[in-house]
Every structure is written in structure tokens, then in C-alpha cells.
Image: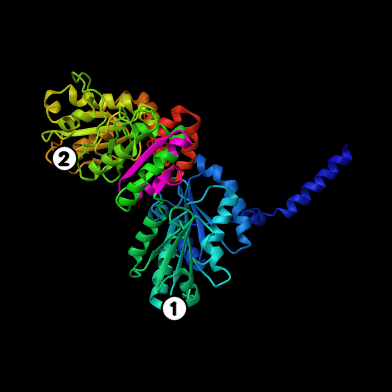
Amino acid sequence: MKGFKELSAVALSLLACTVSAEDAEKASDVHVLKKDTFEAFVKENPLVLAEFYAPWCGHCKALAPEYEDAATKLKEKGIPLAKIDCTEEAELCEKQGVQGYPTVKVFRGPENASPYAGQRKSDAIVSYMVKQSLPAVSILNKDTHDDFTKADKVVLVAYFAADDKDTNATYTQVAESLRDSYLFGATSDPALAKVAGVETPALVLYKSFDEGKTTYDGKFEVEKLVEFAKISSTPLVGEVGPETYAGYMDAGIPLAYIFVDNDEDKEKLTQAVKPLAEKFKGKINFATIDAKAFGAHAQNLNLEQKWPAFAIQETLKNQKFPFDQDKELTAASIAKFVEEFSEGKIAPSIKSEPIPEKQEGPVHVVVAHNYDDIVLDNDKDVLIEFYAPWCGHCKNLAPKYEELGKLYFDNKDFASKVVIAKVDATANDVPIEIQGFPTIKLFPAGSKGSPVDYAGSRTVEDLANFVKEHGTHKVDAYVPPTPEPEEEAAGEKLGEAAAAASKVAEKAEEKVESATTKAKEATETAKKAASSAAAAEEKHDEL
Ligand SMILES: *[C@@H]1O[C@H](CO)[C@@H](O)[C@H](O)[C@H]1NC(C)=O
């Protein structure tokens, strides 16, 4: 026994020797950056991946071991990974526009950052960053050209003369900005241009669907090329899913959905809308959507979950035009509907709960059909909460919001000037884009066109002060609680401090909640959706 003890003591001291303080710090290959080192670091290194995090954030903790592993693998390739603790470097994180944790960005110098759009796994990070380190444009020759045009679903190849510096520069700029979306190649071999059937300079988008390729022979201007890439890469009749949804929403044109729950309907209706998709190319996108996986999304379009179904969403105004589900979906009936939609002959459908017969409580209940009457009442300052029944933060706020409502409701003078209201934004179409729940806005009397967003902590006092400060009537309704005898006051203060602290934490969590549910995370949310109906409810606001 004694011998073992001595032995282990020796072993321990050996260990202690090898892990000196210095080595312990160096054990991580992730560079810790601070306000005074960040800029120099991203200047020195042409390509850097940086994570902005908070120690308490769960997603950051989950990412940490993956990030460490990726850092070690990428170190060999000369691509450094860095991290910034935003609880210590608030100023730096604010400057970088960090809104949720973790925020991961690719830097090419201090002025050029783009969001990391890969998965949060070591292998994905490594492959993403290796791709980022390659030139945005691959130079092609007669041996590599043909394979390259088939290397991905969408591939762009530019053909221009070796001395055409302007075209080269413009194209390179486009490739740099869209490198995460498509593969870009270029060649100055005139023989290859001939085979492609183009006069230089030209750009050809090769695709594994529809007509196979589309040629651009207009002027080489950045915006024109970007538009060409976006429009030509969109399939005539595509499919809405986690990878494509954000693209359709950002396309700036309406999206026509075809909900189908079997391959036969999918094929039949795809063929039926093809001529329309051709006719309205660049004006309306058409896509099928798998009703088995994403059927809950139909509710967002004011459709019942009955398949097949068809609806158009005007993405800019978030208006919905569902096709009457009592009528049969045929090539002719869809064509008529789309034509009428394009001529502005169809009114958008507005989802609304019934208007309450009487406003009884201190918080007014708003629905789509009384939204204008209450929220846009020009005589009143109206504070309105957009909530979702499943949202936990909304539930926590509810009692405080009632209390806030009472401050005005119980005072005749105040009640004539201020309305505290709420609307279930999942059951009512509201003319506002909701990014997260709860969203709170004040519509001041006399300037209903300029609502003010509430971003403070969710306490009665702060909310009331917000109404006072930003409301037209400047109603000061908050009455601070009368101070208690001294001893207890101390206890209460502590309680308040603790409450305030937890509120800060809640707010920070909240930011993360909204940031993580953004489109980029649609994959995750969509998977959740497929597995549970409740989650589907939550997800379809994002999908
Ligand atoms: C574009 O310019 C770069 C940098 O000068 C050059 O390496 C590349 O070969 C040019 N591209 C073509 C297709 O000539």
C-alpha cells in the first residue's frame, strides 16, 4: 500500500511538472480576444472565425467542445478560431452588432464580416472554413470545365478574355458575396466559350433541374449578376423546406405554395402549375411543400389542414391568399386564381378571433377585426403586446401586464388617454412583422404611423415610465410602493436586487431565444416540428 502511495505521489508530481501554468493556458487552440487585441488580430490574419458568447448561455456551452476541436484541426491549416466573452467585452460586442449568443462570424479583415452559416459541429466548422479559405472563383480549363458544371445543383461559370480586368473584378466581387450559396468558376479559354455557345463576356448558370442552364449576356454589373443568380437558380417549381424557406421569404416576390401529402399529387400539381411558373417567372415563385412534415404551416396561410391545398403569400406585406378549399384544385382553377391574384382582384384573407362583446378587464383584448378601432384610435396612447399562447415569457408577463392595465383602467382621466392592450398574434393577422414573442409597441396618440418599440425590462414601473415618456399624453400613472420600516426595507431591497438580476438574465435569455429561432435555425425547428404537434405550432411562425 505504501509503495503505491509513493508511486502515485511521484506520478502526480511528474504530471504537475508537465502541466505548468503556461501550458494549461495554451491547452486551447481558441484565441481569447479582447477590446484591445481584436482589431489587430483580424487584421493580421486574413481569415478568422470568431465566436461572441456569454458564459451562462446554454447554446454556447454546447458549442464549446466542438469549437475547441475545430480550432485544433484548423490550426494546421493556418485558420485561427477566436472567442470573445461578451460579459467582459460589452463594448466590442456591441460594436460588432451582437444580439444573441452565440454569434459566430467569419472575418476577412476588420471591415468584412459575414455570419457563419454552417452547423455547430466540429466537422462542419472545419469544412466550412476550408471552403472559405479557397478562392471564391475556381479557374477552369478544358480538363476541369465539364466536371465543374456538374459539381453542385447550381454552378456559375463566367467566360471572359484574360485581359478583361473589369469583368474579372466585377465577377470576383459577386462570387465573394455569394460564395456561401453557389459555386463559381471562370475561364478565359475561347474554345470553352464556344462550346458553351456564348460570346464573351458571358455568364452561364448550370443547374441540375429545369432547363439545365441559363445564360446571362447582359452587362457585367454587380446587382444585375446577383439578381440573375437568384432568379435563375430558383427552380420553376421548387420545394419549400428548412433550407429554402428563408430564400423564398427574401426573394421580394409572392410565393405560391402547393401543399401535397403524396407523390402522385405532387407530380400532378407540379405539372399543372409549370406553365404558370413559366409565365410568372421573376414575379411569383411556385413551390410544393410536404404537408406531412410542414402541414401546420397551412394555418399561417389561413388554410385548413386538408390536402392538397394552394395559397399565395405576398411576402412583402405578409398577406395571405388561400385558395377556396371547397373547390377542386385543377390546372384551370389554379390558373384562374393566379391570374386574378396578379391583377389584384383577390382580397387578402384576414384571420381573426371574434371581436369581444365587451372589454371587461384592465387589458383590452385586440383581434384582427378590431385592431384598427383600438390600436389606431388617434385620441389614445395605445400600448399593445403581441403574444403567443405557448410563449413562456408572455405567461410570466401576464400578471404584471394586468397590474399595469389597472393603473390606467381604474382612473377615469387616465383611461380616457391610455389603453393597455394585447393580441394573440397566432390567432389574428396583424399588420406588423413579429420577430419574437412578446413584442410590445406603443402607438402614440396623433402619430399612429410611428409606433415605438419597447425594449426595456418587463416591470410595471418601466412599462409605465415608457408610456409616460413616449406617449403623447405623458400620463404618469405609476405610484411607487410606500417605503416599509427600515429593517424590512433592507430585506426588500435585496429581494428587488435579486429580482432585477433575474430580469437581466431573463432578458438576455430572451434575446438568445429570438436569435436562435431565426431562419438559419429553421432546420432544427423543422425537425422538432415533424416530431411533435406542439413544436410544429411554435415552428410554423418561423417556417
Ligand atoms: C482574374 O484575375 C485573377 C487575378 O488577376 C487571375 O488570377 C485570374 O486568372 C483571372 N481570371 C480569368 C478567368 O482570367
Q: Quadrant location of residue 542?
A: top left
User: Relative to 248, is 129 above or below?
Assistant: below
In the figure, is residue 36 to the left or right of 344?
Answer: right
Which residue occupies 23% across, 20% down? 361
State the residue in front, 397 or 268.
Answer: 268
The label nearer to you, 2 versus 1, is 1
Q: Helix or strand or loop: what does disc 2 sit on?
A: loop
State the residue in front, 400 or 223.
Answer: 223
**Badge 2: how crowded within 10 Å, few (<14), some, or many (20+)?**
some
Q: Helix or strand or loop: what does disc 1 sit on?
A: loop
Mark on residue 21? none
Which amino acid is tagged 1?
A: Ala
State which region is magenta. 237-266
**Where's the C terminus, which quadrant?**
top left
> Ligand 1: does it lie within 8 Å of the C-beta at label 1?
yes
- Residue 478 shows in this picture: no
User: Relative to 116, is 295 above or below?
Assistant: above
Mark on residue 448? 2
The residue to which callout 1 is attached is: 161
